[in-house]
Image: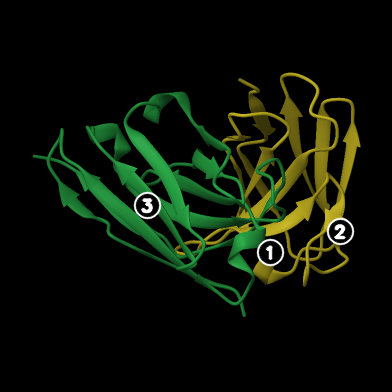
Chain colours: A green, B yellow
Amino acid sequence: EVQLVESGGGLVQPGGSLRLSCAASGFSFDEYAMHWVRQAPGKGLEWVSSVSWSGGFTGYVDSVKGRFTISRDNAKNSLYLQMDSLRGDDTALYYCAKGANAGPHYEIDFWGQGTLVTVSS
Amino acid sequence: EIVMTQSPATLSVSPGERATLSCRASQSISRNLAWYQQKPGQAPRLVLFSASVRASGIPARFSGTASGTEFTLTISSLQSEDFAVYYCQQYEKWPITFGQGTRLDIK
């Protein structure tokens, strides 16, 4: 059974940093692209970042470029999102999500339950 | 950036009736489109990919079509568990983009 368990969310002040983690199990983690998608309270889904199976290709939505860094550790079956210079509009539920293939240009076929990030003073 | 536009924003349909949800891409995305279902308090769930292929465990009452940059999700006979918000998503190009969602309500 595929499982994605996010952690690391919480309350942080504007300008602060957080590191989100996602522990994956139930599939061959090193064979699939992974994604972070967020959802602000009461709003729709917004893609944040993707990483290919090897970590060699990464992509970001413009609003987080230069502030967020996606990475993965295939030996630990884990995905990360380092978030720096956080702003109020980064407040959202952050989902870890599994891609359907090794490259990032495929559908997302499984989602975790999310971890909440709140940026506020 | 490819803009995905869903319509209508809200659709009220009675159980047993057909629901048709639309999604338009601002440029060609081939068939690189997925539909997701999200119920309150839950993570999204993949419904269709490649515009018309049902994901694992999705009942046959869900179907999808594509015509150029216009995509449609049809639910042939609505069941109570189908009432949710549905999002389309293109994965043709980065940035990956979602539509704003269609809320499917019980009439």
Q: Which mark is residue B76?
A: 2
Query: How many other residues sit within 10 Å of disc 3, few (<14), some (14-19) or many (≥20)?
Result: some
Q: Amino acid at mark 1?
A: Asp
Nearest the eye: B20 or A5: A5
Q: CA distance from mark 3 to mark 2?
A: 32 Å
Rendered image quadrant of residue A5: bottom left
Left or right of residue A55: residue B67 = right
Rendered image quadrant of residue B94: top right
Residue occupied by mark 3 = A93
Q: Amino acid at mark 2?
A: Ser
Q: Is residue A96 above or below residue B92?
A: below
Q: Which mark is residue B82?
A: 1
Left or right of residue A99: residue B73 = right
Left or right of residue A20: residue A85 = left
Q: Secondary structure at mark 1?
A: helix
Rendered image quadrant of residue B84: bottom right
Q: Secondary structure at mark 2?
A: loop
Q: State which chain disc 3 sits on.
A: A
Q: Is residue B3 above or below residue A52?
A: above
Quarter placement of the N terminus of chain B:
top right
Q: State which chain disc 1 sits on.
A: B
Q: Residue at x 74, y 69 (%)?
A: B79
Please indicate, yes or no, whether residue B35 appears anywhere in the rendered image. Answer: yes
Q: Amino acid at mark 3?
A: Leu
